[in-house]
Amino acid sequence: MSNSTNQQILLKSRPVGEPKESDFALVETPIPEPGEGEVLNRTIYLSLDPYMRGRMSDDRESYASPAELGSVMVGGTVSQVVKSNHPQFWAGDFVLGYDGWQAYGVSKGETLRKLDPNQAPISYALGITGMPGMTAYFALLDIGQPQAGETVVVSAASGAVGSVAGQIAKLKGCRVVGVAGNEAKCDYVVKELGFDACINRKTQDLSSALKAACPNRIDVYFDNTAGSILEAVLQQINLGARIPLVGLISQYNAETPPPGPNLMPLLVKRALIKGFLVGDYQHRQAEFVNDVSKWLQEGKLKYKEDVVDGLENAPHAFIGLLQGRNFGKLIVKVSDDPTR
């Protein structure tokens, strides 16, 4: 690819079931020019997240409009400003934006957030100090409301959201049990992140493993996946349990809606299950950034990134994300990071 052109990945077709690399198209276009009040950004990092699977479809109800066929695939980005026609941004600034799967993007100034490389690595703005971390923070604390001594279970525990939610629950004095997809991930959340236990969902019986790991049953279930894990957890919840429903990873590739779990325990235990969208909490972003940045600087939170080199590898990496192949927050390094 020439430095005078913009590399882009377009949504070529809507996937049926699991996405395929042929659902995407890699193209070259001219580097755009920013208009009045706009900035031109060079993408350094691109975030890959499970929600993107929902944006690829137009046949299901969602909280956001589907990505258009033939358009640049949506996604959060960390970039450096190349040209600016906006009074609040200068060439050289590092920014968090939403330029999608491309090497260069033009953004309106109101959609950007300046980043300070001295506060945290700029890539963290796509993870622990960005949308995934914010999801973990508010869904756990506002919906889960964990109390010292309670038991918190977290699915997708080694991922960008679950790993942060579990660590915050430990900071609040809870017993924390993770559920992950292999032994390496389970070892990581217990030995590195400080979870009290972790269940391998692929090799262990969920019901019996949850009983053993949660002798006082379950007060909070941080649900990233739904499906069989939710069904097993519901049999172990305490009176007044709280369940932040954050993601549906187990269902994103389903061609037909899966059968629902038995919800009788929600009634019997007078439990709460509440859906969460991080966009509802943008007005409280400063609160989240201040707390998480302080915990990072104090060494109270740990964070793992899974970095893929090259924009052209984004489709393959995204498909692997939905299969659980990533280990940590999945990002694509699109160009050089001058801060590292």
Image (tube, rainbow, N blue to C red):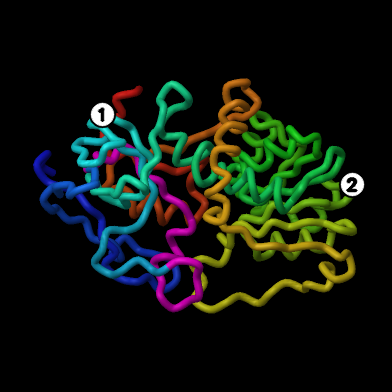
**Residue 49 within the segment the image draws in magenta:** yes
Q: Is residue 68 left or right of residue 304?
A: left
Residue 138 location (% of width, % of height): 64, 47
In this view, 69 is above or below 25: below
Which residue is drawn at the image coordinates 67% and 53% (left, top)? 201
Q: Nearer the viewer, mark 1 or mark 2?
A: 1
Compute the Cα span from label 1 to label 2.
54 Å
Q: Crowding at label 2, few (<14), some or many (≥20) Cα neighbours within 10 Å?
A: few
* Tag 1 near tag 2, CB within 8 Å: no
Label 1 element class:
loop
Q: Which of the 4 image quarters holds residue 285?
A: top right
Which residue is drawn at the image coordinates 52% and 34% (left, top)? 304
Residue 241 location (% of width, % of height): 82, 57
**What's under tag 2, amino acid-wise?**
Pro
Residue 219 location (% of width, % of height): 83, 51
**What's under tag 1, amino acid-wise?**
Gly
Give the labeled residue for mark 2: 215
Q: Which of the 4 image quarters holds residue 184?
A: top right
Label 2 element class:
loop
Which residue is drawn at the image coordinates 64% and 62% (left, top)? 275
Foreground of the two, 34 or 156: 34
- Mark drawn on residue 92: 1
The magenta region covers 40-64
**Residue 107 within the segment the image draws in magenta:** no
Foreground of the two, 264 or 313: 264
